[in-house]
Amino acid sequence: MRARTATPWVVLGATVAVAVLLPLAAGPQTADFGAALRPPGPGAVLGTDHAGYDLAVRTAQALRISLLLAAVCAVVSTVIGAAVGAAAAGFGGRLDAIVMRLVDAVNALPHLVVGVVIAALWRGDPVAIVASIALTHWPAVARVVRAELLAATSSGWVESSRLAGASTVFVTRRHLLPAVTGQALVAAVVLLPHAVWHESTLSFLGVGLSPDRASLGALLGQARGDVLVGAWWTLAVPGAALVITALACAACGSGLRRLTAAPTPQVWR
């Protein structure tokens, strides 16, 4: 069971290592149209793209950009969602009702359409991509954080701790934070593959990053024409990198959910 739990983290770590180290080891890349669309083989293990770039290096560079953007999006979404959920659960009453209606309204929006509109207004700007993803994916985190805080508050442990003389700091540290921290970490990891897919979709549609800072989605978009002339590897290589990364992140999120389960509460100590 431990080996099975560790495997996704090993895969994700290896993916990040390749994304960081391979471009550094390969050095600066230049276009070589004479070597364009070479199939996998000697000199280019995974082939070359339509501009003659080594596809392995190009995919590693794109993966690094996609992972960085996705990580920023996941963190920003988690922070926004955790703050909104904590405010709703902490104040309760009418504010809770208003906040949850806001969550429902944002959740009802077509995320991809909103993302395309925001990204298209500032085409090629990484900040616009982060905003388009983070501002539409925080409601799920807000719901989870609110539910966990309400469950912790109504479990009886909080009230028992206060009756036993525990301070607000103790209650927050021993009961509320353990109930929320694990779920927030899980939410950030679970959002990571979703952000990768979303960013890749925006780049695939042509409203993401510029070609000189190509992400996985941009490589997949460029490969559409290459596949028609038989260069299947230009689609298979970045596609495989995208799928492997997303599956590894999702598996890590499932494992992290079990590892970060809140410990058995103590009334007071």
Image: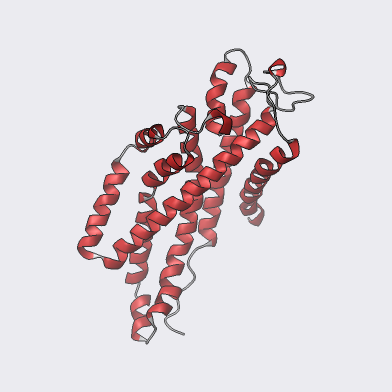
Asked if residue 116 is positioned above or below residue 39 in the image, the reply reads: below
Residue 120, quarter of picture: top left
Residue 152 is left or right of residue 228, and the answer is left
Q: Is residue 147 visible from the viewing direction of this image?
A: no
Out of 229 and 256, give the one closest to the viewer. 229
Count the labels in the image.
0
Residue 119, quarter of picture: top left
Asked if residue 261 is positioned above or below residue 133 in the image, the reply reads: below
Who's the residue at 21% across and 64% down the image?
Answer: 93
Q: Hey, which residue is sitting farthest right in the picture?
A: 42
Who's the residue at 43% across and 79% down the image?
Answer: 170
Residue 62 is left or right of residue 196, and the answer is right
Out of 7 and 186, give the one closest to the viewer. 186
Out of 7 and 112, give the one closest to the viewer. 112
Rendered location of residue 66, percent (x, y): 55, 39
Asked if residue 120 is positioned above or below residue 192 in the image, the reply reads: above
Who's the residue at 57% across and 13% down the image?
Answer: 228
Asked if residue 73 is positioned above or below residue 29 in the image, the reply reads: below
Rendered location of residue 255, percent (x, y): 55, 54
**Visual colour scheme:** secondary structure
Q: Hey, which residue is sitting farthest left in the picture?
A: 94
Who's the residue at 33% across and 85% down the image?
Answer: 163
Rendered location of residue 253, percent (x, y): 52, 51
Q: Is residue 120 visible from the viewing direction of this image?
A: yes
Rendered location of residue 266, percent (x, y): 45, 79
State the quadrant of the N terminus. Answer: bottom right
